[in-house]
Amino acid sequence: MEFGITSLSIIPVRIKPEHISEQVTQLLFGELYAVHEKKNGWLRIEIAHDKYQGWIPASQFSEITEQQFRTLQDAPKAIAAELVQTVAHHEVSFPVLFGSNLYEFDGMNFKSGKEKFVYAGQAVVPGEVNAADHIKKLACKFLHAPYQWGGRSPFGIDCSGFTQVIFKLLGVNLSRDAYQQAEQGKLVNFINESREGDLAFFDNEENKITHTGIIIGDNQIIHASGKVRIDPIDHFGIFNKDMKKYSHRLRIIKRVL
């Protein structure tokens, strides 16, 4: 088996080995994966942090050894907390996005594989930030980011990609899709028992969970629907202020912090 590290700002991960195929998620700079299959210039990978599988072009593969992969999985790291920030490597510079992995970050320098980089932006160490003080502030950085199926970046993000990236900075590994995330954490029985940072999940007419967002207090939720937005929430669901009607039906609330 081969192993890789994301050496680009972002890599689309697709459901089939072709460029016109549906994007199901994205890799952010520094994220790790294992290669399970090769086909016609494409690689079927499994992402290390959430076990999600999909296809990336072989041309975007950056190989590391199994030993490097295992070492980096356990290595201390910070997570980029700027929506976009340039990193420099020798004479080359390029942007990295919110949620990218900065291994062995000392406040200015970090490593990715064997290479050394300079990052002058804000970063947080997972588990060392107070969720109660930071989750709303971090989530609101994404306000007005456009909705994009399979997206995990400020330039396009879906509902569960949004919650996954925000909670990554808090040291919580969420699964990729909303229905998978709904299986994590502790059940909160009533909306009036919820607190800032709880995850709310919403179902469709077939009773399948299809949407999620982060409760931020004051009977409000921040979520990706058309764009990342803040709307009122009650025991019925999300009331869309623009449409002046309920847009999502509340199913359950879970506490993962």
Image: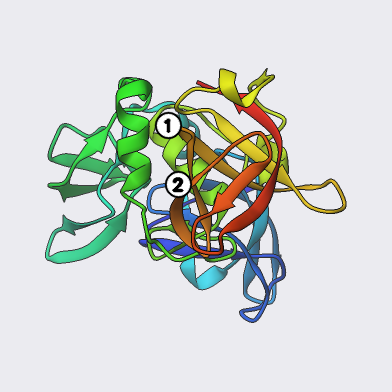
**Which residue is situated farthest in the front direction here?**
244
Q: Specify whether 181 is left or right of 84.
A: right
Callout 2: few (<14), some (14-19), or many (20+) C-alpha neighbours within 10 Å? many
Image location (x, y in percent) of residue 131: 37, 23
Residue occupying image coordinates x 49% and y 63%: 242
- The crowding category of the residue bearing disc 1, from other C-alpha atoms within 10 Å (few below 14, some 14 to 19, many at least 20), is few
Q: Position of residue 229 (x, y in %)?
A: 44, 54
Could you say which is closer to the camera, residue 138 or residue 175?
138
In the displayed structure, 197 sits above or below 11; it is above
Residue 67 visible from this viewpoint = no
Q: Is residue 25 left or right of residue 134?
A: right
Circle 1: residue type: Asp
Q: Earlier in the sequence, mark 2 or mark 1?
A: 2
SS class, disc 1: loop
Question: Up-down: is 104 above or below 40?
Answer: above
Q: Which residue is mark 1?
A: 218
Q: Which mark is residue 31?
A: 2
> Looking at the rendered structure, which numbered label has been put on residue 252?
none
Q: Residue at x 66, y 34 (%)?
A: 235
137 left or right of 164? left
Contact between marks 2 and 1 (CB within 8 A): the answer is: no
> Is 21 placed above or below 32 here?
below
For image coordinates 25% across by 62% down, the residue present is 95
State the scheme by which the image is colored.
rainbow
Q: Position of residue 215 (x, y in %)?
A: 50, 34
The residue lying toward the viewer, choosing from 213 and 15, is: 213
Compute the Cα span from label 2 to label 1. 35 Å
Task: Classify mark 2: helix, strand or loop.
Answer: loop
